[in-house]
Image (cartoon, rainbow, N blue to C red):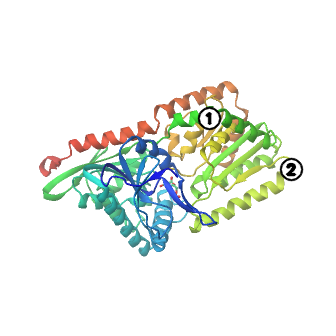
């Protein structure tokens, strides 16, 4: 792998996230290597990190292993060690079985355990210490996502010289739901250690600000929150939305490659040349509405609106959080539904659903997007959903129909998609039929508008906007005396 030793020890930009851009992997035969890790966050930040002189602090994806800092593919990597027990309590437990379901509007019931919380505090402190050690004087530290909400406050206490940003990649729930959290005040306090707190949607930022008003009574004016600090000096914290995006050009470039286009043709042929390919691409997660999508498609087959010769659903469900209870149950539920449907409707030559419990390299994903006539994004709740944006970026032919849940953050921007409520199965069925039958003129018109959105706000625009707001705010930060803030 393209790694080398000898990185610098402090950096003017430090990114902190639970997962590093690379995962350490041990194969069955014992061979070890670093692989690009899953998830939208890595895809989003990679270009920025490569372009700047920064370090990335995070977990290497395996427990009980220590690694010295190294440089991978032009990015300085600072691995944080987690024990097996911490992995269970901090990552699988508090992050993914408490905060994740709670912040996604309790689609699955969140579990509240005090030992999980204690591990979360402990591990957040470790991340904060590593970040503080990697940051040069006056450096900018950008902390990411729900796994690390206490890090901003911990960093500020250790290093008041730092400029601290936080970005929440997932939704922030309304107060009625947030209020369930036994540690609701501590989490807010942790986040308020940042100078700038970014969210995907305006509604998320609004939910956060109202939680701060309800639980702390701090005055908010628009996107500004006045947080009382030491010696009667207030800090102004900004909480607003910065919808994340993708490196759209690099997706289009891949899509234009002849070998990738050939692969797309091959995929269609291998599927038995159906008239319409429907595609779903998700981490296997209960927030994604995969079961709703399968139900709608199954009913369309059942009532004869579509046939397997004409229409195939390709579903890529990449393995995710496989030791967390609700994810284990979800896999059984989805695979039972897929098996039933295929048993009832597939023929020897045509499958109803081509189901893949796999992650694929980006080239293969782009070929799938190119092959797909209709992209189905039916999330019940989703911070943004970058799959929707990837599909749009790839379609340089301006063809293809995006069916998009209004509960995905992406729906705030991608209004030219066919917007759906995934809970309304009849509505979803009608939208799928409409997408299948949509006249070419309308497809092109919609896709042109969608592409403008995605290319105008690509990931570079996103990170530039966030970092500019962060550093400009910091320039006027010294604080507002109590008397003036009132
Ligand atoms: C979402 C989260 C990320 C996370 C990714 C993959 O995109 O916002 O923080 O890294 O899912 O999940 P995992 O638990 O495998 O890191």
Q: How many numbered callouts?
A: 2
Residue 432: x %, y % from top left: 69, 41
The answer to whether the residue labelled 1 contacts the one labelled 2, judged by CB atoms less than 8 Å apart, is no
Few, some or many residues within 10 Å of mark 2 (<14, 14–19, 20+): few
Judge left or right: residue 357 versus residue 266.
left
Q: Which of the 4 image quadrants contains residue 466? A: top left
User: Relative to 354, is 321 above or below?
Assistant: below
Residue at position x 49%, y 72% in the image: 84
Disc 2, SS: loop
Give the label, 1 or 2, closer to the camera: 1
* Residue 164 vertical placement versus 150 (above, below): above
Q: Is residue 410 visible?
A: yes
Sequence-first tag of 1 and 2: 1
Q: Quadrant of residue 261?
A: top right
Q: In the displayed image of the protein, which residue is found farthest to the front?
A: 5
Label 1 crowd bin: few (<14), some (14–19), many (20+), radius 10 Å:
many
Q: Position of residue 329 (x, y in %)?
A: 64, 66
Q: Is residue 298 left or right of residue 105?
A: right
Asked whether mark 1 lies closer than 8 Å to ligand 1, one says no
Query: Horizontal placement of 13 versus 48: left or right?
Result: left
Of the pair 367 and 67, the residue shown nearer to us: 67
Tell me the residue that label 1 is attached to.
255
Under circle 1, the secondary element is: helix
Q: In the drawing, does residue 5 fall left or right of residue 261? A: left
Residue 482 image offset from top left, x and y in percent:
14, 52
Q: Which residue is mark 2?
A: 347
Q: Nearer the viewer, residue 439 or 387?
A: 387
Label 1 to label 2, Cα distance in Å?
31 Å
Observer-nearest residue: 187 or 247? 247
């Amino acid at each position: 792998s393209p790694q080398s030793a000898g990185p610098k020890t402090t950096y003017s930009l430090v990114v902190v996230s639970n997962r590093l851009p690379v995962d350490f992997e041990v194969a069955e035969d014992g061979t070890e290597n670093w692989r690009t890790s899953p998830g939208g966050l890595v895809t989003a930040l990679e270009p920025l990190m490569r372009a700047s002189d920064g370090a990335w602090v995070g977990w290497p994806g395996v427990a009980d292993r220590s690694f010295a800092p190294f440089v991978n593919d032009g990015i300085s990597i600072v691995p944080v060690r987690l024990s097996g027990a911490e992995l269970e309590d901090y990552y699988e437990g508090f992050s993914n079985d408490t905060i994740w379901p709670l912040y996604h509007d309790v689609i699955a019931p969140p579990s509240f355990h005090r030992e999980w919380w204690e591990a979360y505090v402990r591990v957040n402190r470790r991340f904060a210490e590593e970040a503080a050690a990697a940051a040069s004087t006056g450096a900018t530290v950008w902390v990411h996502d729900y796994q690390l909400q206490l890090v901003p406050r911990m960093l500020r206490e250790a290093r008041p010289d730092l400029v601290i940003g936080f970005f929440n990649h997932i939704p922030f729930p309304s107060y009625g739901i947030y209020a369930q959290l036994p540690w609701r005040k501590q989490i807010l306090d942790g986040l308020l250690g940042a100078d700038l707190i970014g969210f995907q949607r305006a509604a998320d930022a609004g939910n956060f600000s109202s939680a701060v008003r309800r639980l702390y009574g701090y005055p908010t004016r628009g996107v500004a929150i006045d947080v009382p600090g030491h010696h009667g000096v207030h800090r102004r914290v900004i909480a607003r939305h910065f919808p994340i995006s993708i490196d759209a050009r690099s997706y289009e470039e891949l899509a234009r490659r002849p070998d990738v286009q050939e692969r797309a043709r091959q995929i269609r042929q291998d599927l038995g040349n159906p008239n319409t390919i429907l595609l779903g691409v998700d981490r296997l997660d209960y927030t994604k509405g995969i079961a709703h999508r399968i139900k709608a498609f199954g009913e369309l087959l059942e009532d004869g609106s579509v046939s397997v010769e004409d229409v195939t659903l390709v579903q890529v469900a990449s393995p995710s959080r496989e030791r967390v209870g609700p994810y284990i149950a979800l896999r059984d539920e989805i695979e039972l539904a897929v098996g039933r449907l295929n048993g009832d409707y597939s023929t020897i030559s045509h499958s109803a659903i081509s189901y893949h419990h796999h992650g694929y390299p980006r080239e293969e994903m782009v070929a799938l997007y190119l092959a797909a006539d209709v992209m189905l994004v039916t999330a019940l709740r989703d911070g943004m959903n970058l799959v929707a944006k990837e599909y749009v970026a790839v379609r340089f032919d301006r063809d293809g129909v995006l069916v998009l849940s209004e509960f995905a953050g992406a729906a705030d921007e991608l209004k030219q998609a066919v917007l759906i409520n995934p809970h309304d199965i009849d509505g979803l069925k009608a939208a799928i039929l409409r997408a299948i039958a949509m006249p070419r003129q309308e497809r092109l018109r919609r896709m042109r508008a969608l592409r403008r959105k995605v290319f105008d706000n690509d990931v570079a625009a996103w990170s530039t906007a966030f970092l500019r707001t962060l550093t400009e705010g910091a320039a006027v930060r010294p604080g507002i005396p109590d008397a003036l803030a009132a």
